[in-house]
Image (tube, helix red, strand yellow):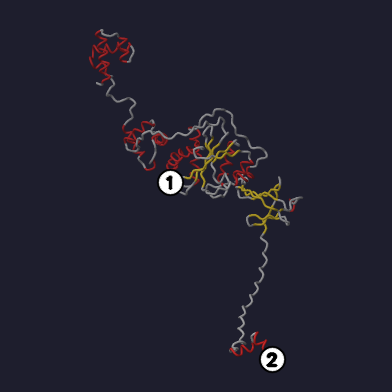
Amino acid sequence: MTQRDRDHLIALKKAAKGLITQRQASEQIGQTERHVRRLLRRLRTKGDQAVIHALRGRPSNRKIDEAVKAEALSILAQPVYHGFGPTLASEYLAKDHQIAVSRETVRSWMIEGQLWQAKKQRLTEIHMWRERRPRCGELVQWDTSDHDWLEGRGPRIYLIMMIDDATSRIHARFALHDSTEENMRLLWSYLDCYGRPVNFYTDKASLFHTTPKIPRDSKEVPRDERDPLPPTQVGRALAELGIVWIAAHSAQAKGRVERSFQTAQDRLVKGLRVAGAHTLEQANAYLEAEFIPWWNTTLVVRPASKDDAHRPLAKTHCLAASLSYVETRQVDNAYTIRFDNRIYQIARKDIRTGLRGAKVRIEVRLDGSLAVRFRNVYLEVTERFERPKAAPAAKQKKKAVSTPRPKSQWMKNFKLTAPDKAALCPTPAATSLASKKAIR
């Protein structure tokens, strides 16, 4: 008998002796007066056992059989379910093994079976909360996660994801490289599915932002403040499609897509493991057939406004042209263009006034084709063979280095003695004396 039962028994005995009223007893016990009258009748027949519930000590009618518990623990102990949390484990038990139990029941089973360690709640650092955008398509966050998604079973792949800020709806695909081409492919599929969003929110990666090459310790004014740098291929494509690009200055600023990667790195990795995916194609098949539908039906939220901010593509928009690698070249006098170490000849029927010497736009599209546009007209071009290069001029033979002339020997034995030297070079006094003798 617990202390609570003893307190109830004392209150009932006082009510039976008339020391307190039944209403006062009901207030002390926390039950209604009708229940107190029922307990008083049981007190006269069963004595002190009246306050003990008749079902105490008996197993609950909702208790799960021990065989089901043992089967669930044996399933979760398999290597394929290593690292599963109680929430994910309960979902897989219900979906794949028809064992429908609650998340907390699975948690207690896993703790008892030493498959899960209970964690104490910790107070983490709280950042400034930003309110969601009210409309779907008003802001879409875009980022790439570099993670071992296949856990060594296949090639290293990257998850490129877009998540709507208002609803948390995702659009993603796996790729072998986090390149401009793969990001443009995902952008194309997003625009086909939902239309043009108002803003894209990304980090300052080289795919989206051209960084000036200035040493960190330099005090020079950044070039983008003096003279804006040309946009990247993705930035140019967004500008042509009328979509605003917003740069995030920190990882916390785009926290919605960062937190979605945390969820994916837990659940998606384990789902790929259970599905046995070991190639890029299998990973994308599971992502499109299982993970994205589950996310978009389970984790999405209702936006504040029912209006959809996505805009349809206009007739002037061409995804094949905008989502391509674009450069400009100058047409030479022979109406040819040099690009990627090749020469392309413009068809005679497309030659028009102002074409010679003008700049044309060259588009290398995602399907590998090449398109050349002059103003608003596409030109037909054919690849030509490289012109034969002129033979290099024969190198002239270098003149032989002449040997230096020997030094002249005409002064070799020419040595003057002192008397001879005086005779050859008389002093001024001797010269004046000789001149006087001659006069006499």
Out of 368 and 403, give the one closest to the viewer. Answer: 403
Element class at badge 1: loop
Amino acid type of the residue tagged 1 in the rendering: Glu
Residue pointed to by mark 2: 437
Out of 236 and 163, give the one closest to the viewer. Answer: 236
> Quadrant location of the N terminus?
top left
Q: Position of residue 233 (x, y in %)?
A: 60, 46
Residue at left offset 57%, top offset 48%: 220
Out of 323 and 422, give the one closest to the viewer. Answer: 422
Looking at the image, which residue sits at the far top? 18
Contact (CB < 8 A) between labels 2 and 1? no
Q: Position of residue 275 (x, y in %)?
A: 44, 42
Residue pointed to by mark 1: 151
**Mark pair 2, 1: CA separation:** 126 Å
Q: Position of residue 253 (x, y in %)?
A: 51, 37
Question: Circle 2: is it few (<14), some (14-19), or many (20+) Cα within 10 Å?
Answer: few
On screen, residue 43 above or below 323: above
Residue at left offset 62%, top offset 82%: 405
Q: Earlier in the sequence, mark 2 or mark 1?
A: 1
> Quadrant location of the C terminus?
bottom right
Q: Nearer the viewer, mark 2 or mark 1?
A: 2
Residue at left offset 45%, top offset 39%: 262
